[in-house]
Image: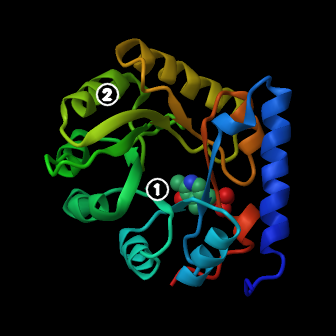
Amino acid sequence: MPSDPDLAARLAQVDAGIADAARAAGRDPAEVTRIVVTKFHPAALVRDLAELGVRDVGENRHQEAQAKAAETSDLDVRWHFVGQLQSNKARAVRAYAHAVHSLDRPSVIDAIASDDGREIEGFLQIDLSGSPGRGGADPADAERLADRVLAAPGIRLAGVMAVAPLGEDPAPAFARLREVSERIRSLAPDADRISAGMSGDYAVAIREGATHLRIGTAITGKRPDAG
Ligand SMILES: *Cc1c(COP(=O)(O)O)cnc(C)c1O
């Protein structure tokens, strides 16, 4: 039994919301991957989610992600790293990550590349706020970064990722991300994934073409305070 009796209901409600938004946009809900962001919650929550059928989980801090991945290594879940990546942690992130959503500069791409025989999915994180640097590349640098990933061993360029800027209507922001995605696809047709949409804006993101949603609190409930 999950320790939170409402977890299953919240998950079902979000999944119904995803299905509705996809159908309203004329899209197949099955083409949308819902990642549950479990940051600040204990590994037991990942276990509860896995029992409810969740296969994709996300974290934004390396140490926390590494510990939870180790504690739940018996589960069939895929870890998505969605937080700011430091070059000196990149190798360690690679060891447990199925996908990294925060490639935003050449140094982290170079650091996470490897010829270890595994391939992880890499998303280019694009800044939509107009002030790149706090996570996310200048949209003008997208092609250059894409080329860097395409040349890097052990990373498959999946597409682009962004967080909607605070205090702004997310729709035009996600539309800008979609334009960047189209530019990347003209270089790399398979890099057609768009990671966008969180608890408050996932329906808008689906309308603007998101294929990967990163949803935390709408499913997990309020986060415990950051440790
Ligand atoms: C925490 C986090 C999310 C999930 O946010 P919610 O608002 O709780 O859904 C999504 N993406 C990133 C990068 C995050 O850090």
**For the view shown, which residue lies furthest in the top direction?**
186
Ligand 1 position by quadrant:
bottom right
Return the residue nearer the eye: 226 or 101.
101
At x 38%, y 37%, the residue is 137
Q: Amino acid at mark 1?
A: His
Label 1 sits on residue: 80
Residue 47 position within the rendered picture, expressed as x and y whole percent measured from the top left: 59, 77
Q: Is residue 50 visible?
A: yes
Label 2 neighbour load within 10 Å: few <14, some 14-19, many 20+: many
Residue 73 position within the rendered picture, expressed as x and y whole percent measured from the top left: 42, 75
At x 57%, y 45%, the residue is 163
Q: Amino acid at mark 2?
A: Ala
Residue 224 sits in quarter: bottom right
Q: Is residue 169 visible?
A: no
Residue 109 sits in quarter: top left
Label 2 sits on residue: 146
Above or below for 183 versus 70: above
Label 1 neighbour load within 10 Å: few <14, some 14-19, many 20+: many
